Amino acid sequence: MKLFFRDLTEKDIPAILDISKDIWEGDDYIPDVIERWLDEDDKLVYGAFLEEEMKELIGLGRVKMFSNGVAWLEGGRVKITHQKKGIGRDLMKYAIDYAIRADAKVAQYDTSSRNFGSKALAKFHGFKEKKRMEVLEYKTSELKLTKSDFSQIRKITNEEAKIVYKKMDIGPGDELNIGWSYIPLLNLEDKNSLWLTNSEAILQKINIKSHAQPEKPRENEVWIIIYGDPLAACKLISYTLNFEIDEDKIDLIELYCKTEVVKYVKELGFRDPSWEDEPVAVVLYEKKLN
């Protein structure tokens, strides 16, 4: 199947939204970010068409260029009537070719460990798993406050957090998890998050006001990302549950952590997500470009 590609503009937004409405049962994040994406510099937002006149949009994607040589691939969507025809492979190849022309060192994207279609694309195009963060959840209706020694915990700024992260084991490379996405540590700019540290671990609390990533918590949710020693991490989480959660507004807390922390946070009451029938993780894939 031959496809034709071109850059998308604001005139294409209605067609983009028409594709998006059938993604994730209408819960796609694209409507919240597409205008910002089209306005940003150092990016490509592209569309795929079946006819040379390029009028009927059947697929789209985006490539964001970071200053450290990373081409970040995201927003890949195929119209529901044209799925399972290999169009997703062609969309990703177009993004990879663009990244190569832009002299990117690597191409990256993230996906759920349960998104088998996205994982199949990674294998087809030669991407390798680089790191992952496990996802767990906590319902505030079941909140059980705990007493502990919180004397070493302090709040820090975004800039101070960058320094602390460099001392933590965040896995290979400098990519930092920010919920359902990753970002180069150098590009971490989020003035709305709360950061806590006790020197041995660091915690980021994200709410709906965050603009650090396309996907963000709903109004009734908070995301917590934790790195560091498991026991020190649990103290930061306990402090957050005790003092930084508004139970009248927040119903659900999603936690993102490394595998070795899972057994400890489950003792605090965190469980595997209720929307999946088995554990789920946010996986970062990478492909080196020549």
Image: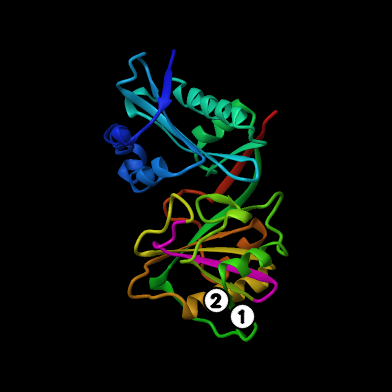
Q: Is residue 39 visible?
A: yes
Q: Is residue 25 above or below residue 257?
A: above
Q: Position of residue 42 (x, y in %)?
A: 52, 40
Q: Position of residue 129 (x, y in %)?
A: 65, 40
Q: Nearer the viewer, residue 48 or 159?
A: 159
Direction from residue 197 to residue 214 in the image, left or right: left
Residue type at numbered disc 2: Ser
- Magenta residues, start to end: 198-211
Q: Secondary structure at mark 2?
A: helix
Direction from residue 50 to residue 88 in the image, left or right: right
How far apart are the alpha carbons under marks 1 and 2? Answer: 11 Å
Which residue does the numbered mark 2 point to in the structure image? Answer: 238
Query: Image point 63% across, 57% down: which residue?
Result: 258
Q: Residues within 10 Å of mark 2 (few under 14, many from 20)?
A: many
Colouring method of the image: rainbow
Query: Image point 35% across, 44% down: which residue?
Result: 35
Q: Position of residue 197 (x, y in %)?
A: 62, 74
Q: Nearer the viewer, residue 169 or 65?
A: 65
| The C terminus lies in quadrant | top right
Which residue does the numbered mark 1 point to in the structure image? Answer: 153
Residue type at numbered disc 1: Ile
Q: Earlier in the sequence, mark 1 or mark 2?
A: 1
| Quarter residue 178 falls in | bottom right
